[in-house]
Image (cartoon, rainbow, N blue to C red):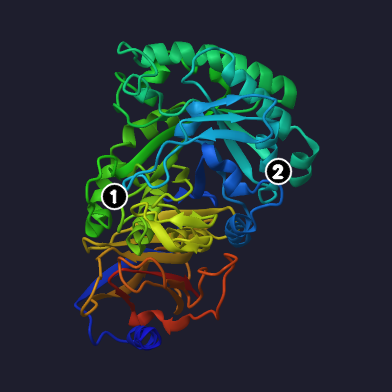
Amino acid sequence: MTILWHSTLLLLTLGCSVCFAQVPVTIPLAAPGNAQLVSRSLFSFSIEQDRWTDWIGQGPVNQFFFNTLNNLKNIVQEPPRIRIGADSEDRTTFNPQVQLVQNNFPQFTAQLPYPEATSNVVGNNYYQLASLLPPGTPVTWGVNFAINDGQTAVQEATAIANAFNSAPFKKASIMLEAVEIGNEPDLYANNGLRDNTWNVQQYVTQWIATAGAVMTAVNNIMGVDIPLLAGSISGSSHNNAGFSPQAMIQNGILASAPGAQIKLFSQHYYSGSFCNGNAAVLQNLMSKANIRANLGAFTPDIAAVHQADLTYILGETNSYACHGAPGVSNTAAATLWALDYAFYAAQLGMTRLYFHQGIGYKYNLIQPITLTRSILDGTTLAQPLAPHIQPLYYAAIVAAEAIGPLGITHVAELTVNNAQISGYAFFEGTSLSRALFINLNAYENGQRGSVHLNLNFQGAGKQPTSVIVKRLYIPTADATQGLTWGGRTYETQDGLVSGSLSTLTIPVTGGVDIYDTEAIMLTFG
């Protein structure tokens, strides 16, 4: 059935015998003024700190995890960036007598089959393992700000700096890109980590004191000033009151000595929440309007950060908070959501998105170790589940190919007069190179709808006569496997790509069909 469906797609690319609608799309031949330079590491990774050793491996490298990162590096010639921290960042202390890490985990539940550790005690080798990442990987590491004792963060930061200043890191060109001090401090009062008077002014005062001590230690060891990442807040007031970049700047964080080393502002954001076990709906995640409304709220924050000459990132993000919603976050629906989400974020001026990952989390791109209980409800699996990718991984692969390896790619959103189809044009420098279209209509069964895109070009530049069509095949929106990108799969034992490449070259005058729950990339010739 899959083979027949693929064949049908290829035939229908040339015509429109079953299309429900035709939509004209105008594509500029040269980069418009609103095109944004897009980072090759737009899709990056936030790793829950407690089980870092499971991700990277405890001596020999975790080859599956390495391969999945290296796949992305091979496409764009730059590794994805790694942030190690999150909730367990503020539950970590350092003890030089510990070999790697000692964790305490709570009892798992059906809602949280793989909960975060309640405490983590780490030693020097815990940090040294980062030398096993793909060569050239930039790393941001978080230290404990919740404990607020003036020493814990310095001890951790000293061990981190000693690791990154060692020979294995220098040989592999693995760099300490930034130090993060605390995770979601805006929630500290809610979580019992500060009293109920906690506010942004107190945060700035305490952050300056801790950051000053941390950076003195780190810079002395590294011999250079290492950037700081500020914010890492779960929400934003979007104004000068409450927790926001505007309020932090107004309260003097950048005017301080450690503030001079702030290079990035990090916002955390999830499109929804599963923290109370609420059911989620595929189509609610796959919503063009929701994506734009959710991300658009951060426009004033981005402007304030850019005005301060800082980089704005989503330092922790994914579909549904509290590890994802079952039947949504772990499905192909999240793949298309993430593609539109990431490129729309780039259009707004967000430089990079760190998709959060934890062992057994439902919204992962990658499950890097063998699992023995279900990620959906914690029940024991009949057979252990070997390391594998999840559908969301294909979003990172497709995005990498759309961006390309040159480091000069700009992206501009296209006007597509369809409530559920998004489009983006990619320019190498200023010249049109590729376009990506995403159909967010959720297909689950029955006849599969489609839309025919009539391609028009405008502006200065050579108009293409042909286009190479490459499709992200998705069986259904709720599929957890069986996806292919250009006929090839990453659902392999080692995480490496397998299969023969399948694309189709057609004249641009005929346009192209896009099916419900599908993405297509057009490469112009």
Name the residue tied to disc 2: 131
**Mark 2 burial class by Cα count in 10 Å: few <14, some 14-19, many 20+:** many
| Residue at disc 1, secondary structure | helix
User: Mark 1 or mark 2: which comes first in sequence?
Assistant: 2
The quadrant holding residue 467 is bottom left
Tag in front: 1 or 2: 2
The reply to whether residue 109 is in sight is yes
Where is residue 186 drawn, in percent x and y? 36, 24
Residue 365 in view in this figure: no
> Residue 293 in the image: x percent, y percent?
25, 45
Q: Depth check: 359 or 314 in front?
A: 359
Assign the N terminus to one quadrant of the image.
Answer: bottom left
Element at label 2: helix
Are the residues tagged 1 and 2 within 8 Å (C-beta)?
no
Q: Of the numbered discs in the image, which one, if any, rests on residue 291?
A: 1
Q: Looking at the picture, which amino acid does disc 2 mark?
A: Ser
The one nearer the camera, 406 or 496, is 496
Query: Which of these two is toward me, 80 or 459?
Result: 80
Q: Residue at x 59, y 55 (%)?
A: 65
User: Which residue occupies 71% across, 47% down?
Assistant: 59
Mark count: 2
Closer to the camera, 386 or 405?
386
Q: Is residue 49 above or below residue 199?
A: below
In-image side of 201 versus 525 (left or right)? left
**Residue drawn at the location 71% of the way across and 34% of the way down:** 164
The amino acid type found where label 1 is placed reads Ile
- Residue found 26% across the figure and 55% down from its top: 288
> Splitting the image into 4 quarters, where does residue 260 fall?
top right
In the image, taking residue 439 as reference, residue 346 lies left or right, namely: right
Question: Relative to 276, does residue 409 appear above or below in the rendering?
Answer: below
